[in-house]
Image (tube, rainbow, N blue to C red):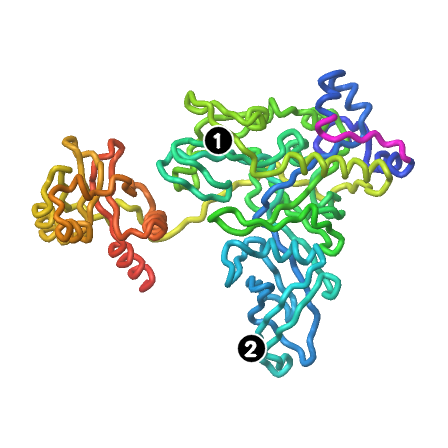
Amino acid sequence: MSTRGEETLRTYEEVNRKIVSGDAVVMTADEFVELVRAGGIEAAAKEVDVVTTGTFGAMCSSGAFLNIGHTEPPIRLNECFLNDVPCYTGLAAVDIFVGATAMSRTRGIEYGGGHVIEDLVAGREVELKAEGRGTDCYPRRYLETTISLEEINQAVLLNPRNAYERYNGATNSSDRLLHTYMGTLLPKLGNITYSGSGQLSPLYKDRGFETLGIGTRIFLAGAAGYIVGEGTQHHPQKQLGTLMVRGDLKEMDPLYLKGASIQDYGPSLYVGLGVPLPIINLRVAKTAATPDEEIKTEIKDYGIASSARPSLRTVTYAELKSGRVNLNGRDVPASPMSSHKHAKEIAEELKGRIKKGRFLLSRPAELLPIERPLKLLRTKNSHTVGDIMIANFATAGPRCDISRAATLIVQSGIDHLPIVDEGGRLIGIVTSWDIAKAVATGKQHLRSIMTTSVVSFSKEDSVDEAANRLLTNHISGAPVVDRENKVVGLITIEDLTKLYGRRGAR
């Protein structure tokens, strides 16, 4: 019987005997979908032994454990950098962990841990610089050399979270350009980005997780890897299951492991991953046959800086892959962050290895959990813009003369003067510096000097988001507006500095 209560069609042992003898019937998930469409699920389930899946996308929660070997005299690593990317050294003396999203000290977000991992797998030498504290048993204090994958002892790719069952799509309702881990999002719902391989998705094709668990052998970046267990943020109730996986970095192929830098966000690692699904029962067959037209996900609004971003609509992967999605009555372009082409190649490569007898299946020692709570971290001293904004402020209309504006700024003691229309709605802003320039150049009215493209906030925005946007836009303050764009306050860098100072003093 199947572990989760469905009549068994075939056992792992039977499948592996057929693989060894060359008699196994293996199809990619794409092929299996079409077979079921043509002849029905029961006939397909009896015919096919294994369905292969694949995905190739940015998997930020990735990294590698390396044992670089002892030196003479020995050193216990306190700080370590590979190609100037910081590595974690809070382990044994010469064990390190390089995380995919760690950033270079000198090259910033353009080069990171994902690139280091790719360089090693591609056979390139990597510069190592390290410092030790110096102890009686580890007296060496400094180390500078180069290493290669061939020279070091162990190199294990160990990824805490890969291969989401499905990914939420992303769009942006705000009036500004956003740079996110989902790529660049144009303002005012200008585009949609998404990830995942839809009907090739490894986890979605076995939604009951009846063949997935600790010890499941998988295709990982060209090598045979294994599922270690559930990945972090595993939330199967929302069809957001994840995998923790490991494999020998020395056996991997740089074709399936690519360092990347996501524009104005940071480094990551593209990982090629495929899972073979033995059709052990009819239920596994049914989920393996799910087409893109029935695989749904949510389009989330990244214009809202919250962990609970609102969903603007439910969409199928068929719609996403078409390149156009109807959103709020508009035809919005949709583009993938992951590679469908490489996902297909991985499923085909895995299929070929199984058919040639080079890849046997393994029964998991323990299945992935099908229920798991996902909690948000409880924080202290969380503040919103509304908590610290200046409520007593002056405004002016666009026809206000420069001298009157200067008086308002002096009286309020604030360097920013929002410009509003007759209904109190924000249409611009001037600063004391703008006023000084206006006086020097003989300008008469605010409409000739005001900035009309204004960064603004709502009272509900977090102070951390406000600080980030003020610094990113190189401005010292901004208006706070309500839903009707009426000015209700001001927030400045000075207010934020005082708040962060109080936080640091606690």
Rendered position, 408 above or below 501 = above
Q: Residue furthest bottom?
A: 136
Horizontal and vertical percent for residue 259? Answer: 61, 51
Residue type, numbered disc 2: Arg
Task: Report the Cα–Cα distance between label 1 and label 2.
Answer: 50 Å
Q: Residue furthest right?
A: 21
Q: Residue furthest top?
A: 39
Quarter of the rendering occupied by the C terminus: bottom left
Q: Judging from the image, what secondary structure is the residue with disc 2 in? A: loop
Q: Is residue 94 visible?
A: yes
Rendered position, 244 above or below 346 = below
Mark 1 Cα within 10 Å, few/some/many (few <14, many 20+)? many
Please report whichever mark, 1 or 2, sits nearer to the chain's N-terminal start: 2
Start and end of the magenta stretch? 22-31
Between 150 and 46, which is closer to the camera in this rendering?
A: 150
Residue type, numbered disc 1: Ile
Horizontal and vertical percent for residue 171? Answer: 45, 34
Which residue is at a point 9% across and 42% down the rendered structure image?
Answer: 401
Tell me the tag on residue 299. Answer: 1
Q: Is residue 82 left or right of residue 50?
A: left
Between 480 and 229, which is closer to the camera in this rendering?
A: 480
Which residue is at a point 15% across and 42% down the rendered structure image?
Answer: 446
Residue 301 belongs to magenta span = no
